[in-house]
Amino acid sequence: MSKDDEIGPMQARSDLIGILSKYPETTDALVTLIQSELNDLQESDAVSNISSIIAEAALQSKVDASTRDNLLYWLTETTPDVRQMILVQTIEELLNLENCRASTISALVKISS
């Protein structure tokens, strides 16, 4: 495993937390990511949906294109284990942030219903 392979998922998690915590109302991004992961990116439009929702959330959060593209790589081009680790740790961190707790719970409720 190269250094980039070790650091990349941690950076992607950090970037995703940064995007979602700057604009907590973007719970649709979290819902889309979780639903796509539950479907294991099998649906033909799953990657497109992830790309669209992350692009919109990144725009609202004023994140640069290279950060957005790196995050998209880790959420769409890596193994399920890596993607799931990023999502689980992101959810844990968002639940610990006061300004993101309600929107994160709302996203999780949407998934479970």
Image: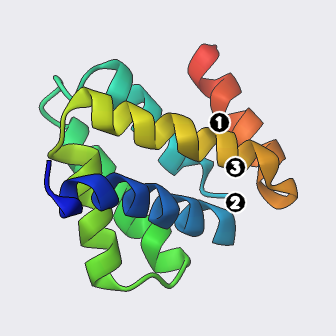
Local crowd size for mark 1, using a 10 Å CA cut-off: few (<14), some (14–19), many (≥20): many
| Above or below 78: residue 14 | below
What colour scheme was applied to this rendering of the protein? Answer: rainbow
Residue 17's x, y, as percent? 57, 59
Q: In which quarter of the image is residue 78?
A: top left
Q: On the rendered structure, is 85 left or right of 89?
A: left
The three-letter code of the residue at mark 1 reads: Ala
Residue 107 is marked as: 1
Residue at the spot x=24%, y=70% of the render? Answer: 69
Local crowd size for mark 3, using a 10 Å CA cut-off: few (<14), some (14–19), many (≥20): many
| Above or below 36: residue 25 | below
- Mark pair 3, 2: CA separation: 9 Å
Residue 80's x, y, as percent? 26, 28
Residue depth check, mark 1 versus mark 3: number of the one nearer the observer: 3
Residue 18's x, y, as percent? 57, 68
Q: In which quarter of the image is the C terminus?
A: top right
The three-letter code of the residue at mark 3 reads: Leu
Front in this rendered view, residue 62 or 5: 5
Q: Say whether residue 104 is visible.
A: yes
| Above or below 35: residue 98 | below
| 3 or 2: tag closer to the N-terminus | 2
- Mark pair 1, 3: CA separation: 11 Å
Residue 29 is marked as: none
Residue named by callout 2: 24
Local crowd size for mark 2, using a 10 Å CA cut-off: few (<14), some (14–19), many (≥20): many
Front in this rendered view, residue 30 or 75: 75
Mark 1 secondary-structure assignment: helix
Residue at the spot x=26%, y=67% of the render? Answer: 70
Residue named by callout 3: 94
Mark 3 secondary-structure assignment: helix
**Callouts 3 and 2 close, C-beta under 8 Å:** no
